[in-house]
Image (cartoon, rainbow, N blue to C red):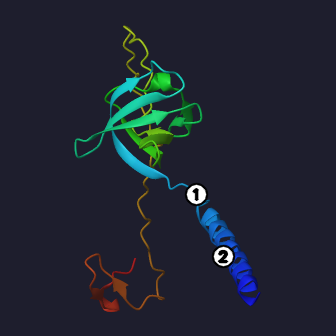
Amino acid sequence: MLGRKFGVSLAIFALSFTAVSSQSYAESARKPIPTLLIKGEIMALDTSDVSSIQLKLRDRYGFETPLYLNKSTRISQGNVDLGTSQLREGQEVEVQYNFDVNTAKRHAVSVALTDELPVTVTAPTTDVVVPEPVEVKAPPVVMSAPEPVVPETGTVTEVVAEVGEVVPPAAVVQE
């Protein structure tokens, strides 16, 4: 009887342990899928299947990597969202993708074009516009000579000559 109770409790313990361990495994399996980044040049774009468009990308080492685009893939250039019709062979792109281990496929999350936005070219005009020269006239500058300082008689003890030397008062001619 004691052996039976021990066997039953051992079985219950084993079942509870597997339930707890499988629960912790399920929680650890819920980790987010890491997003990877690849930069390169578009080699080919297969749009025959609309549900999963295949993009072949050549990276800087020369390896061609197939990536799959779906409807949720964001294609952008700067802050402008684009469609798959704007993707061309030879364009430089940065692709963020998730790798599916079960199917060994790379599913693109976002495709960012690294080339600049195309510049719209207007038709050249045949008229040549030459700006007219503008004549700038400065206001006339009036220069006045300083008035000579004439000392009053009897108040000046020394007079300074033009060269900067001091002339004694005896040498000053009185008028």
The correct choice, above or below, for 53 with respect to 74 in the image is above
The vertical placement of 57 against 163, above or below, is: above
**The C terminus, quarter of image:** bottom left
| Between marks 1 and 2 in the image, the one whose residue lies nearer the viewer | 2
The crowding category of the residue bearing disc 2, from other C-alpha atoms within 10 Å (few below 14, some 14 to 19, many at least 20), is: few
Q: SS at mark 1? A: loop
Q: Write down the residue under mark 1.
A: 32
The first of marks 1 and 2 along the sequence is: 2
Query: Please, is residue 30 above or below residue 62 in the view?
Result: below
Badge 1 crowding class, 10 Å Cα cut-off, few under 14, some 14 to 19, many 20 or more, is: few
Which residue is label 2 attached to? 14
Front-most of residues 68 and 20: 20
Q: Residue at x 37, y 89 (%)?
A: 158
* Quarter of image, res 151: bottom left
- Marks 1 and 2, Cα distance to the nearest angstrom? 31 Å
Label 2 element class = helix
> Which residue in the rendered view is the most extreme toward the left?
62
In the rendered picture of this protein, how many numbered marks are placed on residues? 2
> Where does the N terminus fall, quadrant-wise?
bottom right
